[in-house]
Amino acid sequence: MKTDKLIDAIGMIDERKILDAKAFTVKSRRKSLGKAVSWAAAILLCFTLSISALAAAVDPVYQMLFNIFPTAAQALKPVNLSCEDQGIRMEVISAAIYENEAVIVLSLQDLTDNRIDETTDLLDSYRINRPFDSEASCSFVSFDEETGKATFLIHISQWNHKKIEGDKITFSFTEFLSQKKTFDEKLSGLDLSKAGKAEKTQKPEAIRGGGGMGSVDYDTECLVPVAGGILSPVDGITVTNVGVIDNKLHIQLYFEDIRSYDNHGYIDLRDEAGNQAEYDTISFWDDEKVGSYDEIVYDFPPEDMENYQAYGYFVTCKNRTKGNWQVTFPLENAEYTSK
């Protein structure tokens, strides 16, 4: 669907024609540095469009609005205000404000180059200017190759259920990533059968967090990185060591300059039937706190290693654009009031 048609369709939504809502949960598409939002609602809308061709074009809009936020009977209102910086045009297309939640639809377009594409990511640099804390989530909606516009849906929720009040609201962001590359293949250069007992171990001090399929023990002994690493499947990500500690297999990954480029990923171990081995992950900073290590601990005895193959999924980026994009619009132009 063309971005211009998307904008037109949003403007034609009749907020009085909202019929019903049902609850569901959508999981965030990527891990962020401290922000992850789960949306738990669905909004079913009835569009009153007189032209059948336009009605057919509304489907992507419906799909986008289906994941907005957990309050029924909301509707986006047109804003259509924009700003430019670093040759990038940001337009706030529509917005909706309800009590402590805000939904903003915006587009980005590169007026001088090709820095905007289908991988564009606003990171966590976006915010609405309010005097109290909030959490936010950003979803990519579409990219129009003809116009070079990328469209996003931003959901922001104020903490402590504080209502968003005032005469105006300001949305801004300061950087974005683009031209990302994805690696999703078997790691043929990683032979698990050769992994032996770790000669040296460490207890990292600068822990970033953890995750996985079980209970993470942050006191777990971890591998010591091998100088130069063992394998670099993609530029910016390196397997820095593999070994057995306390009868469990450890694989250590290093992500270069994670603060700037959000390089991330994981390694799956799968048996011949495609079953995935359970694992826990401990993340910790390097000495400069610029790059990050992921220590992946697999829950099976070393004698079973020959039954598994390693598969890597990694996302890397080298294109980061910084600037100052900001749009202020009257709160009454976005605040929802029941009819």
Image (cartoon, rainbow, N blue to C red):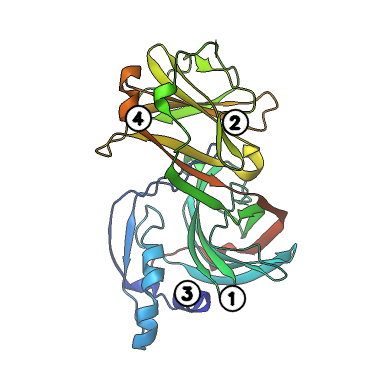
Residue identified by numbered label 1: 147
Q: Are marks 2 and 4 in contact (CB under 8 Å)?
A: no
Among numbered discs 2 and 4, the one appearing first in the sequence:
4
Q: CB of mark 2 within 8 Å of CB of mark 1?
A: no
Cα gap from disc 1 to disc 3, whole angstroms: 13 Å
Q: Image point 66% across, 62% down: which residue? A: 115
Q: Amino acid at mark 1?
A: Thr
Total marks shown come to 4
Disc number for residue 6: 3
- Give the residue displayed 37% in from the left and 55% down from the top: 71
User: Which amino acid type is marked by label 4?
Assistant: Met
In the rendered structure, find residue 296 and report the number of the disc placed on it. Answer: none
Please rate how many residues cluster around mark 2, counting C-alpha atoms within 10 Å: few if below 14, some from 14 to 19, many from 20.
Answer: many
Distance Cα–Cα, label 3 vs label 2: 39 Å
Q: CA distance from mark 4 to mark 3?
A: 39 Å
Q: Nearer the viewer, mark 1 or mark 3?
A: 1
Mark 3: which amino acid?
Answer: Leu
Residue 303 visible in the snapshot: yes
Residues 102 and 260: in front is 260
Q: Which residue is tagged 2?
A: 292
